[in-house]
Amino acid sequence: MPDETNKRALPATGWAVLGLLSFGQELSGYDVKKWADRSLRFFYWSPSFSQVYSELRRLEEAGYASSRRIGQEDGGARDKRVYRITETGMAAVREWAQQAPVDPPVLKHGPMLRLWLGHLLEPAQMRDVLGRHREFAEEMRRRAEADAAAAGGEEAWAFPTLTLKWAERYYAGERDLAAAMLDDIEALTAERGPAGA
Amino acid sequence: MPDETNKRALPATGWAVLGLLSFGQELSGYDVKKWADRSLRFFYWSPSFSQVYSELRRLEEAGYASSRRIGQEDGGARDKRVYRITETGMAAVREWAQQAPVDPPVLKHGPMLRLWLGHLLEPAQMRDVLGRHREFAEEMRRRAEADAAAAGGEEAWAFPTLTLKWAERYYAGERDLAAAMLDDIEALTAERGPAGA
DNA sequence: ACTAACATGTAAAGCGTTACATGATTTA
DNA sequence: TAAATCATGTAACGCTTTACATGTTAGT
């Protein structure tokens, strides 16, 4: 029996999509993308529509999800394909969540990359980059806070809410780190400015 | 004249590599990768060797870097290709650093993705994931601290050192956020445990 | 009726990694 | 001289995005 069939390896995005389905609802690709934008986005990047669609196809092919077409006759507004997690999929995502190694987070911090090249920038430009980043962080913090509040104390969303709380603190941290770096730059240029060229 | 030649768009990794060269030294692919691992890594992921080599080729083709082969006769230990930034490249990376839009950082936080799926985990497993992540964060913080100290007050490394200081605070934050979430989970399971199944 | 926004997908292209191949230098 | 490590690169593959194609619904 050469075909082991199960224990299929998936890219992280695949597990994320399967995780979305693991909350039990039947979702279309569009639903998945929207939900990812509203929750995953705070700590995981949100995949594009096309990526979502192809991951769903892969999940079905692996036996982790099943799909059906629904159309006007089923009460829906139009034809579309909706997906539901299978027992196999539920077991697989549970095992992944429990057993996968704890990998370091991946960070690609564009603003820091630019400040790392501070020798190419004017102080005013550095302040501009940091200021915009601080605004972004505060905006994300605000959204995480609002979403956490909207979730209320619903038992079913306890853990998603916990990660929203984490995100609220994380983006507050980002905001404050930007402010601290603004101060550092201020100090650095003050000590140079009067003396240097 | 249909061929505008310059103002070539690059992927972020390309700018990162060109940024490394912008400090003025002549570097081989191996040097670039090692340096990226030691500095960029704290706030930007470090590209693989093969990615570094292909980016260097692209930079040369764009006229942003020049290369020469050096061998035994030049005092080197063996044949290799070393790259140096050109005037054009210097102008391009400066313009990028000054003009590019301030994009949000990209975060793929595996540990949070797993905790978001807390309904699939036992409390002990959540604590394990968070504990490992906290250790990773503390280790990164320690390295950033050490590297910042090693840089000393060298004028030339002022901005890279500033970003190391930022990283030190960032990873201290990650560490503390993990600890805070451990407490939250403790509270959540305590209120459930005695009552629930 | 027209437009904008919603919704579902496919196709093509590019980014980035892993695996592989090769040879030099150092250490035992 | 054998093994481990350093160093440089290529090839194949897979993930992910952008651009495109298509049709629907809601507002004006």
Image: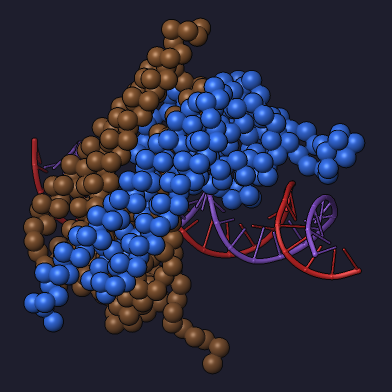
Chain colours: A blue, B brown, C red, D purple
Residue at 37% over, 40% down: A169
Note whether residue A7 is visible.
no
- Pick the front one: A54 or B56: A54
Q: Position of residue A65 (x, y in %)?
A: 66, 30
Left or right, B58 with reference to C2: left
Q: Nearer the viewer, residue C26 or A57?
A: A57
The one nearer the camera, B101 or B79, is B101
Furthest residue toward bottom: B1
Q: Which residue is depicted at the point 34% across and 25% down?
A: B182
Q: Residue A18, located in which quarter of the rendered image?
A: top right
Q: Is residue B85 left or right of residue A83?
A: left
Q: Position of residue A64 (x, y in %)?
A: 63, 28
Decide which of A66, A24 is in the foreground and name it.
Answer: A24
Quarter occupied by residue A129: bottom left
* In the image, residue B120 above or below residue A36: above
* Image quarter (top left, top right, bottom left or bottom right) of the N terminus of chain A: top right
